[in-house]
Image (tube, helix red, strand yellow):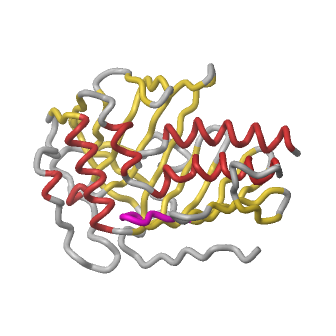
Amino acid sequence: MRRTTTTLALAVSALALLTACAPAADPTPRSSETAAAPASPTPTDGAAVASPRECDDVDLIADAKVTGADLSACVIAFSRAEGSGHLHLQSADLSGEADFVFGDDPATSGSVTGADGTTDFVLTPAEAWVTIDGAWVKADAASGDYRAVIASTIGESYRAFADPAAAASLLSSAPSWTVQTDQDTVTLPDGSDVRAWRLQADAPFSAAGVDISEMIVWLGEGHRVVGTQATGTFGGLQTTSLQQFTKWGEPVTIEVPKG
């Protein structure tokens, strides 16, 4: 089991780097229509969608140029304003679901499934818990128990899911982005469709040891973060990872396992 958990930890570390910003089984949007098509629907609670002021320099119009710094600030500001949500993650070898809380005390709970099975996790600012062989293990990098050390490695990798600041180093590492000509119709994991602008990095870039050949961010009405897609190489292994975000602003409770 030690070999398996070590492999999982390394794979998750690479994946987390690619998904730190913050789409479904098919990474390609179902269709693309003209820019005049309706924008994304309003949130499920019926509230109007308003853009954070940090998004003022991110113009969602065809062919607009956006700096990585401005895009990063916009995504982080939107995430903090909403405060919580749900994400669906997928790569060639891993898939996952998580509820998250953004803010000064980011936390998340969810699961990741790979070839070796499913790993559950709970992360708070003070603790990290991961299931190994079906049992909860509290992370401790200094422990003599290798399971606690592995849990620490996995837990720290997963923290990228819960902290919008992780987006800054990734998105801002690409100097410039371009809003594509047409909006995409993106099918979310719950089966609903959302209209979103696709912003694409203008050139390959590197961040945190990952060489990223392509990255896309989908933003809807009010600069609502709909999804991200990144293709990168880490340790000689190329991975394409995708995220979709739903349930923005809905209440989330993170409970620490008893153990």
Question: Is 106 within the magenta?
Answer: yes
Between 125 and 97, the one lying in front of the other is 125
Residue 166 screen position, x and y as percent: 41, 46
Task: Please indicate whether residue 47 sits to the left or right of residue 164 in the image.
Answer: left
Task: Please indicate whether residue 176 sits to the left or right of residue 29 in the image.
Answer: left
Task: Please indicate whether residue 203 sits to the left or right of residue 58 in the image.
Answer: right
Extent of the magenta region: 102-108
Question: What type of secondary structure mainly makes up the magenta span?
Answer: loop
Q: Residue at x 25, y 27 (%)?
A: 175
How many badges with numbers are in the image? 0
Quadrant for the N terminus in the image: top right
Q: Residue at x 68, y 36 (%)?
A: 10
Residue 85 screen position, x and y as percent: 43, 67
* Location of residue 57 with respect to 207 vertically, above or below: below
* Location of residue 204 with respect to 83 vertically, above or below: above
Q: Residue at x 33, y 42 (%)?
A: 168
Q: Residue at x 71, y 52 (%)?
A: 151
* Location of residue 46 with respect to 93 vertically, above or below: below
Q: List the single residue furthest toward the right.
A: 1
Residue 26 screen position, x and y as percent: 53, 44
Quadrant for the C terminus in the image: bottom right
